Image (cartoon, rainbow, N blue to C red):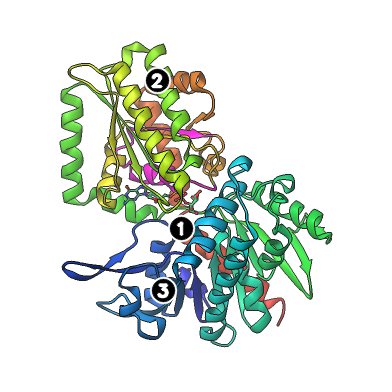
């Protein structure tokens, strides 16, 4: 059954980021569509079934292109309504940069020392959540299904529930849920839990996150929870807490990397690599401290020191995309990464070879997937990661089955890929170096077997199964009240 067939009520999606952004430039207004991730996976579904999508209107031309806060999208062939929440500078700072990204983001990734909360930012976060909720309540048809997302909108489910008891709500938390001892450090943790418990279905990336959430609710709110059924009786309802490991559009990636243009680009890369007898490695990350870029660079240094036979032999492409540049800490991190890369290069480079080729900007999705197809190995070494879609995209793009994946044991994706990927501890540089050496030493047959097994798994666990599973659970939860 397709996802579309599972949806039995009008659908309302609520995300922080919007699927279409209008930007003004010297050449007029341009609509930019987001590529990759959950927003771009939900867009085709919404185009098929129609409905409402509420998001922060962050583009410079968003106001002028959406009279009354509404924009029919896609602009060239309108299929559904995008409702843009316009935020002023103070709201962007308080809701997004501060409370969400300097508070909840580091705390949820268990990086306690980085977490900063303030009551002023909390007030703004709360008000902005209320703004989103008011819009969701006013545009939702009777009995609608609301699919809301992530740590920026944790209070929305309860706000909507209050004014619209007729709707069914699924909220998905994309990042890890930490143990109670950590989450309680958030001064407003009880309010956040009450906000989330307004949903009928609460989705997390892994069973560990589910257990942590249930424990947190039990201890912080002193309510009784059902660990066997993963439910929480809250007010006069039952909240279903479940893991739904997010994934990628496997078949779309497979198709993309095999189209003639990308195939010929990949062949060009391979010719270049093979002519020079090189091994091609790749890492792609937003410049975020959770992705473990600095420890990874130390580990690469260790690798070339312990295994000098790989000098002049490995071409390692590191894509580092600037991220959340409105937060000072991210700008500092970006500079530190750039410095460290220079340091590694200086130490090992020769007249004909540099250890790290860095692309410090976003590259378009077809080429990124092409690089994944062309690579001999990929490294994902997040310190903590809810899932990590890069690792799954790499596997989906590996249609020639030549590459190996080194994957952090602490990324959510490790739960599914740990048997075939090479596990690494992001904080163990010597261990990382040994594992990379081991991964590069296995036979072509073993590489092919490992990647084939991962592909088999992901083929049956795509982003569409993820959505379907959530909607099936929401339907069952909603029916139990009828
Ligand atoms: C959060 C959670 C969870 C990156 N550079 C470029 C580019 N990307 C794309 C990747 C991938 C996406 O960005 C990154 O997704 P991740 O899952 O790796 O990480 P977060 O952004 O932190 O996402 C995470 C996810 O939510 C979903 O639930 O998996 O754990 O932290 O799709 O390909 N895309 C393009 N050019 C780039 O340079 N086109």
Residue 459 higher or lower than 373, as above or below: below
Query: Dot 1 corresponds to which residue?
Result: 463
Q: Is residue 87 left or right of residue 443?
A: right
Q: Answer whether residue 405 is magenta in the image.
A: yes
> Mark 2 vs ligand 1: CB under 8 Å?
no
Circles 1 and 3, Cβ within 8 Å, touching? The answer is: no
Query: Dot 2 corresponds to which residue?
Result: 301
Q: Answer whether residue 35 is magenta in the image.
A: no
In magenta, the rendered stretch is 386-408
Q: Residues within 10 Å of mark 2 (few under 14, many from 20)?
A: many
Circles 2 and 3, Cβ within 8 Å, touching? The answer is: no
Residue 22 picture location, percent across and down? 30, 70
Q: Is residue 139 left or right of residue 162?
A: left
Q: Nearer the viewer, residue 419 or 305?
A: 305
Q: Nearer the viewer, mark 2 or mark 1?
A: 2
Q: Nearer the viewer, residue 384 or 404?
A: 384
Q: Nearer the viewer, mark 1 or mark 3?
A: 3
Q: Residues within 10 Å of mark 1 (few under 14, many from 20)?
A: many
> Mark 1 vs ligand 1: CB under 8 Å?
no
Query: Dot 3 corresponds to which residue?
Result: 46
Q: Is residue 62 left or right of residue 88?
A: left
């Amino acid at each position: 059954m397709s996802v579309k067939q599972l949806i039995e009520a009008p659908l309302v999606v609520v995300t922080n980021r919007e699927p279409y952004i209008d930007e003004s430039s010297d050449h007029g207004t341009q609509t930019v569509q987001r590529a990759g991730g959950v927003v771009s996976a939900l867009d085709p579904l919404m185009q098929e079934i129609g409905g409402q999508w509420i998001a922060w209107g962050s583009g410079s031309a968003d106001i002028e292109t959406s009279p009354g806060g509404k924009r029919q999208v896609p602009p060239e062939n309108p299929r559904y309504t995008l409702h843009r929440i316009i935020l002023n500078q103070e709201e962007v700072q308080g809701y997004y940069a501060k409370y969400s990204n300097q508070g909840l983001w580091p705390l949820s990734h268990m990086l306690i020392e980085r977490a900063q909360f303030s009551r002023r930012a909390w007030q703004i976060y709360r008000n902005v959540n209320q703004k989103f909720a008011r819009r969701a309540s006013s545009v939702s048809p009777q009995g609608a299904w609301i699919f809301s997302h992530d740590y920026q909108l944790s209070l929305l489910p309860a706000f909507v529930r209050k004014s619209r008891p007729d709707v069914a709500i699924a909220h998905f938390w994309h990042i890890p849920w930490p143990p109670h001892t950590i989450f309680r450090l958030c001064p407003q943790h009880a309010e956040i839990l009450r906000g989330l418990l307004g949903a009928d279905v609460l989705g997390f990336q892994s069973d560990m996150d589910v257990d942590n959430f249930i424990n947190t609710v039990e201890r912080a709110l002193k309510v009784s929870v059902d660990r066997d059924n993963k439910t929480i009786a809250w007010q006069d309802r039952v909240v279903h807490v479940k893991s739904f490991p997010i994934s990628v559009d496997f078949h779309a990636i497979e198709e993309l990397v095999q189209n003639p243009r990308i195939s010929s680009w990949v062949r060009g890369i391979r010719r270049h690599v093979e002519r020079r007898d090189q091994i091609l490695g790749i890492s792609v990350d937003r410049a975020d401290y959770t992705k473990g870029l600095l420890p990874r660079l130390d580990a690469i240094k260790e690798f070339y020191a312990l295994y000098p036979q790989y000098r002049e032999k490995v071409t390692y492409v590191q894509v580092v995309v600037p991220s959340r540049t409105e937060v000072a800490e991210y700008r500092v991190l970006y500079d530190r990464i750039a410095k460290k890369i220079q340091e590694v290069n200086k130490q090992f480079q020769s007249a004909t070879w540099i250890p790290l080729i860095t692309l410090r900007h976003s590259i378009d999705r077809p080429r990124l997937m092409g690089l994944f197809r062309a690579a001999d190995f990929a490294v994902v070494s997040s310190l903590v990661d809810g899932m990590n879609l890069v690792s799954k995209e790499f596997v989906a793009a590996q249609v020639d089955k030549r590459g190996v994946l080194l994957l952090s044991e602490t990324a959510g994706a490790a739960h599914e890929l740990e048997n075939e990927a090479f596990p690494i501890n992001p904080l163990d540089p010597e261990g990382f170096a040994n594992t990379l050496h081991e991964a590069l030493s296995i036979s072509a047959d073993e590489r092919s077997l490992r990647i084939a097994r991962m592909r088999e798994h992901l083929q049956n666990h795509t982003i569409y199964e993820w959505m379907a599973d959530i909607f099936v659970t929401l339907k069952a939860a909603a029916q139990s009240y009828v």
